[in-house]
Structures are given as structure tokens and as C-alpha cells.
Amino acid sequence: MAFLSSRRASRQPETEFDAFEIVAAQVVDVIATAGVVLDQANSVVRASPGAIQFGLVQNRRLIHAALVQLADEARTASGAVSRDIELETGLRRDQVFVHARAAKFGERYVMLLVDDRTDSKRLEETRRDFVANVSHELKTPIGAISLLSEAMQGAVDDPEAVQKFAESLQREAQRLANIVQELIQLSRVQGAKLSENIGELDLATVIADAVDRNAVLAEQHQIKLASSANQSVTVIGDYEMLVIAIKNLIENAIVYSGEGGQVGVGLRVVDSVAEITVTDSGIGIPEAEQERIFERFYRVDPSRSRETGGTGLGLSIVKHAAQNHRGEVKLFSKVGVGSTFTLRLPIEENQ
Ligand code: ADP
């Protein structure tokens, strides 16, 4: 029985309320997070376990004024009334987003159904933020390109200035290209149907490829890049996706290290999990930022990241690639000492 009730469902209905109660109580828990029946004085005469758990009712009263108001509106409305409402619930006053519906129930009662929509609302917000971020990130280099080309036009008589502007123009165009390329990669890993490009692959080969793609960058930054990943470890996965993930980790290790630093790549197997480690002796990441850096466009130091051509997307690509392979990324880092990122991928049981 969904409602907290002292009456027995099996008993013959005596009043109008009893008759409704039996059916309504069963229906409420199936169709909504919480259900409440209120009398004319807005006293709670029945509340589903969900309503109690969700923190809507205390001492037989609705806690939230917005819900009381909706119930009042339902009394005078011809049909049901509904609204999206933001509430604070529980001792921690957590914010929740609900869709609430109220309707007259017989002559004297109002039934209130409340659906928790917090997750879908958050998802919607994340999407909206993402679009806003993308627009902002694209606007910056596009604006710079437009200004630089204007400046070039005005400096036709000064070859030195033209040369300088052309170099900056190239840098901004490259940045734009990086963002677009990483956005495409991110959308691929986010919506990836792994089965399309999946196959058996040797992680030593994947790592060698990722190291190779960073050889020039390491040289430019005078970083000693060494890999000890020689043993053959077979996993089932998407070759290109894994190469990109490991490449991103190595790239970060290089650009967030000072000149003359060292970056090491390793591979080992621990309890049927392949662990690929990328270790640097670079600037490290403050503990408070260690979770957030996997978010899209998040950077600890935006100006440094921009200088190095970073997009803020690299680690979210790594995170999604790991998840697509039923794996995870772990981070150990100390400011001023360095960081180790570990990509952990399960090895198939039957190997
Ligand atoms: P970006 O393109 O800015 O490098 P990422 O998503 O790859 O974006 O990384 C997010 C942020 O995490 C970076 O801007 C940087 O602040 C931090 N970060 C990532 N890897 C390292 C590292 N190896 N050492 C220090 N900081 C790092």
C-alpha cells in the first residue's frame, strides 16, 4: 500500500475518501515520486512514502508554500493545475527541481503529485552551459583573427609589423583548428558506438603510436619522453580512441612541465586491469582542482592553457574514452612535484 494509512484496503469503503483511497494509493507510487492528499484546511490526510522521503511533509503539513499554493489553485480550477517548481528539501536544504500537479479529488480533497526532475534539469543546464562555452571559446580566436587582419591592412608599409601580425594570425587560426578538432573528437567519444571500430589491440602498440605523435612536441619543449611500455597487453577496444586519449595525457604532461623535464609512460597489469601511466615532473595540480579538470573547458590556469594552445577539452576526451572502454582515469598529483595520470582498462576475462 503506497499511502501511510491506518485504514485497511480490504475494508468496505465507508466514505467518499475511502473509495478513492484504495485505487489512488496504489496508482500514486507508480506514476510519481511523491503523492499527497490534502483536506480543505490543507492538512495532509495521506502521504506516500516518497513524499515523506523527499521531505515534502512535516507534522501533517506541506513544508513548501509553492505546493500549498498549487493545491489552493486546484480547488478553484476546472481541471488539474501543474507547474515546474524549485524546492529546497532535507536538512541540507538540497535544491531539487520538481514538476508538480494538483487536482480536486472528490468534493473535499486535493491530490498533489510531485515528480523529481532534478537530473533532467541538470542535464539540460549542462548542455546549455556547453553551448555557451563553445560559443565563447570560438569567439575569442575569431575576434582575434578579425582584428589582426585589420591591423595587417593598416600596416602594409611596415613589413616587420606585417610579419608579426601574420605570425599571430597563424597562431589564432591554429587555436581555432585545435578547438574544432577536439570538439569533433569529444562528440565522437561521447556518442561513440564502440562496437563499430572495436577490435583486439595491443596496448604496447597503442602507446608507441601515442608517444610517436608527441615526439616533435617533446623536442620543442626539450622534454625527455621515455616509454617503458614494451610488454604486450591485449584489450578489446577502439584503437584510434585509445591513441587519442593517451596522446592527450602525454601532451599535457609535456606542456605542463618546465623545459628539461621528464615524462614517462608505463604499462602494467594489476588484477585483470591494464594500467597505462603517464608521469611528469611538472607543475602539478592543486587537490581542489583535481576533479574539475576532467570537465569540458575547465582549466586550472586559463591563460597558461591558452598560451600552450590548450582547449580545455583534452581530459574530458580521455574520461569519455575510458568510460567507453568500461575503464576509468585516476590522478595523483602534487603541486610543484608533478602528476601521474593512470588510464585503467579492464582486460577481457577470456584472454
Ligand atoms: P588543456 O587543453 O587546457 O590542456 P585539458 O582538458 O587537457 O585541457 O586539461 C585541463 C586542465 O588540467 C589544464 O588546463 C591544466 O590546468 C590541467 N592539467 C592537465 N594535465 C596536467 C598536467 N599533467 N600537469 C598539470 N596540469 C595539468
Image (cartoon, rainbow, N blue to C red):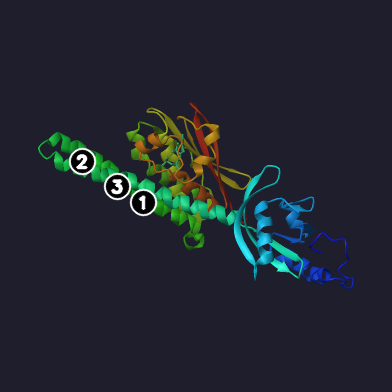
Depth check, front residue: 276 or 31: 31
Question: Mark 2, residues whose alpha carbon is within 10 Å: few (<14), some, or many (≥20)?
Answer: some
Toward the viewer: 92 or 319?
92
How many marks the image carries: the answer is 3
Marked residue nearer the N-terminal end (2 or 3): 3
**Which mark identifies residue 166?**
2
User: Residue shown at 28%/43% (left/top)?
Assistant: 144
Ligand 1 neighbours mark 1 (CB distance < 8 Å): no
What is the secondary structure assignment of the residue under circle 2? helix
Please tell me which residue is depicted at 22% across the width and 42% down the height of the picture: 148
Task: Tell which tag, 2 or 3, sits nearer the viewer.
Answer: 3
Q: Is residue 351 visible?
A: no
* Mark 1, other Cα within 10 Å: few <14 / some 14–19 / many ≥20: some
- Give the foreground label among 3 and 1: 3
In this rendering, would 120 be left or right of 11? left
Q: Which residue in the protein does label 3 denote?
A: 142
Amino acid type at mark 3: Ile
Relative to the observer, which residue lies in front, 124 or 273?
A: 124
Give, as a three-letter code, the residue at label 1: Val
Res. 124 visible in picture? yes
Write down the residue under mark 1.
180
Q: Is mark 2 within 8 Å of ligand 1?
A: no
Quadrant of the drawing holding the N terminus: bottom right
